[in-house]
Image (cartoon, rainbow, N blue to C red):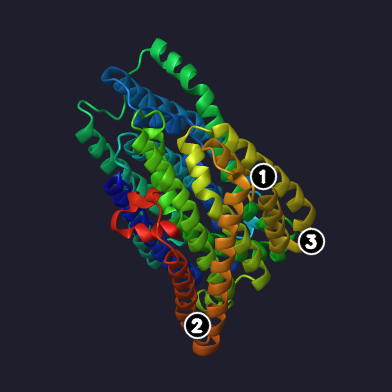
């Protein structure tokens, strides 16, 4: 398990580092070729389309869980064929719906400021549907036990996207660079994923035939699990895209567009950081699915120990990173995105609110992924739906007056109420632990790490100043948090439960 988990995490980290660096470079490039109003429009529709592949009715995750749990050869092949047939049908239904939605989106007052034809938004919608189909194909590799291949393909996609966007902008294609890059990446990723699946599965084809009787039977059998998963996917989709859309469109005229653009730029940075830091959590859920019904108690115990350790580690990581981000993000964005006309730097208040929200969701992610691997989709869906409902209601009240700040405060308040404690309680009870003890253990680590990181990042800014000095200040703050975590881990002899870490058993105290 160690080698498989380590390989998946290593490639996940490589994938996310590629995403961060290419994403930051893309923001730098876009800020040179377009104004904040155009970026606001682009960010809104692209945010929707980036998450479109997750609207798969939940069946891909349900199928992958059954494949990972182990099934006979005939059942395995039938599941794979069912997935291929299902996603072709979903794409056929989804395409006209998406084209209608992006067409309506193009009529919003703040969107029309970009002065783009409807055909531009329709091209984005088509590219998004193609990406959805490719996403399903790529993620079949997870169910086949080849999770690292998914991360390798994501690494490739990050850099292809960057260079395609940069080249198209240089050739003066303008905003059309985005649908061009999305389509190119989809074709490249889909082709490679198909070849990989064909090497693993004899006789694998992109278009598979399934008898109507088998199709209906599997659709019904998987439906309860898939629907619960779909509910959580919809809620998560809206939680991490709805805030950007609300910030851009609540209020009137250029004030809302400018606020939405700044919010969207900050949200992109936070999304990249969050994706990097949850690498371990994302890599562990297939292991949980594999060993959930395993007769090997030592393997199940090792997976549980890994889940508990990731909760502690995530608290240190998120605390350390978000503590530094609170201090350095605003001056960094001011330097990184400034052009001849303006900059896209978010306000300091917005940075604080978004940092606190992502800290809460981040330290809870291992618990959420454990519940995902265990098939507790309904628990996740209920928590996410509660958070979304509260966030939208508060945003509709505060957003028109305070724009991005009001939306950020609303989503933070909802996260505190729906995620700060309920996910810990659900996870702890599912594995037979005391919820309150684990809750305070995790929160204490996050607070100590954030305070240490933030304090040293502030000192770094006084020493090295702003502009490029923000990099050094962030590293200084994160290093301070790391040293505090190492000192914490060295305080006592590790328990037997830490044996899954091998020679690094002292990290079990983290």
- Of discs 2 and 1, which sits in the foreground? 1
- Identify which residue, 207 or 102, lies in the foreground: 207
N-terminal label among 1 and 3: 1
In the picture of the structure, the residue carrying the numbered disc 2 is 467
Judged from the image, the secondary structure of the residue bearing numbered disc 3 is helix
Q: Earlier in the sequence, mark 2 or mark 1?
A: 1
Query: Would you say the residues marked 2 and 1 are in contact, meaning their CB atoms lie under 8 Å apart?
Result: no
* Element assignment for label 1: helix
As drawn, the residue found furthest toward the front would be: 493
Kindly report which numbered mark, 1 or 3, lies closer to the viewer in this rendering: 1
Q: Secondary structure at mark 2?
A: loop
Q: Is residue 135 visible?
A: no
Image quadrant in which the N terminus is located: top left
| Sequence-first tag of 2 and 3 | 3
Can residue 458 be seen at all in this image of the molecule? Answer: yes
Residues at marks 2 and 1, CA–CA distance in whole angstroms: 36 Å
Residue 388 is marked as: 1
Inter-mark Cα distance, 2 to 3: 32 Å
* Residue 373: x %, y % from top left: 45, 37
Write the residue at 40% across / 53% down.
495
Q: Nearer the viewer, residue 358 or 106?
A: 358
> Would you say the residues marked 2 and 3 are in contact, meaning their CB atoms lie under 8 Å apart?
no
Asked where in the image residue 72 lies, by quadrant, the reply is: top left
Q: List the residue tagged with mark 3.
A: 401
From the viewer's perspective, is residue 452 above or below residue 101? below
């Amino acid at each position: 398990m160690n080698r498989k988990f380590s390989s998946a995490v290593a490639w996940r980290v490589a994938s996310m580092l590629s995403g961060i660096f290419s994403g930051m470079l893309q923001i730098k490039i876009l800020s040179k070729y377009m104004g904040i109003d155009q970026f606001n429009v682009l960010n809104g529709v692209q945010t929707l389309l980036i998450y479109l592949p997750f609207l798969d009715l939940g069946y891909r995750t349900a199928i992958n869980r059954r494949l990972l749990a182990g099934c006979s050869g005939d059942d395995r092949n039938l599941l794979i064929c069912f997935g291929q047939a299902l996603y072709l049908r979903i794409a056929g239904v989804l395409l006209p719906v998406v084209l209608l939605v992006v067409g309506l989106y193009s009529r919003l007052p703040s969107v029309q400021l970009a002065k783009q034809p409807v055909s531009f938004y329709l091209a984005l919608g088509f590219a998004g549907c193609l990406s959805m189909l490719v996403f399903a194909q790529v993620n079949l590799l997870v169910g086949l036990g080849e999770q690292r291949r998914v991360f390798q393909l994501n690494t490739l996609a990050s850099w292809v996207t960057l260079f395609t966007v940069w080249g198209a902008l240089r050739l003066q294609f303008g905003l059309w660079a985005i649908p061009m890059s999305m389509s190119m990446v989809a074709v490249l990723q889909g082709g490679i994923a198909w070849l990989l699946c064909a090497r693993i599965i004899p006789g694998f084809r992109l278009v598979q035939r399934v008898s109507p009787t088998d199709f209906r039977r599997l659709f019904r059998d998987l439906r309860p699990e898939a629907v619960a998963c779909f509910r959580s996917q919809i809620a998560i989709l809206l939680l991490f895209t709805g805030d950007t859309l609300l910030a851009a469109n609540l209020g009137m005229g250029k004030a809302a567009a400018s606020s939405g653009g700044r919010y969207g730029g900050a949200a992109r940075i936070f999304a990249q950081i969050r994706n990097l830091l949850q690498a371990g959590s994302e890599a562990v859920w297939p292991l949980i699915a594999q060993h959930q019904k395993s007769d090997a108690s030592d393997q199940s115990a090792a997976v549980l120990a890994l889940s508990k350790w990731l909760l502690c580690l995530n608290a240190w990581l998120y605390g350390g990173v978000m503590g530094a981000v609170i201090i350095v993000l605003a001056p960094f964005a001011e330097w990184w995105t400034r052009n001849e006309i303006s900059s896209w730097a978010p306000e300091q208040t917005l940075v604080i609110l978004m940092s606190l929200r992502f800290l809460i969701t981040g330290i809870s992610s291992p618990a959420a992924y454990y519940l995902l691997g265990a098939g507790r989709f309904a628990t996740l869906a209920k928590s996410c739906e509660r958070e979304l409902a509260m966030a939208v209601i508060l945003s509709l009240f505060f957003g028109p007056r305070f724009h991005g700040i009001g939306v950020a405060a609303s989503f933070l308040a909802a996260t505190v109420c729906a995620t700060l404690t309920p996910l810990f309680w659900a996870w702890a009870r599912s594995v037979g632990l005391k919820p309150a003890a684990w809750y305070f253990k995790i929160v204490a680590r996050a607070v100590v790490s954030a305070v240490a990181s933030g304090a040293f990042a502030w000192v770094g800014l006084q020493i090295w100043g702003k502009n490029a000095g923000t990099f050094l200040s962030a590293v200084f703050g994160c290093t301070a948090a790391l040293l505090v975590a190492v000192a914490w881990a060295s305080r006592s002899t590790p328990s037997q439960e830490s044996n899954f870490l091998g020679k690094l058993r002292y990290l079990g105290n983290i």
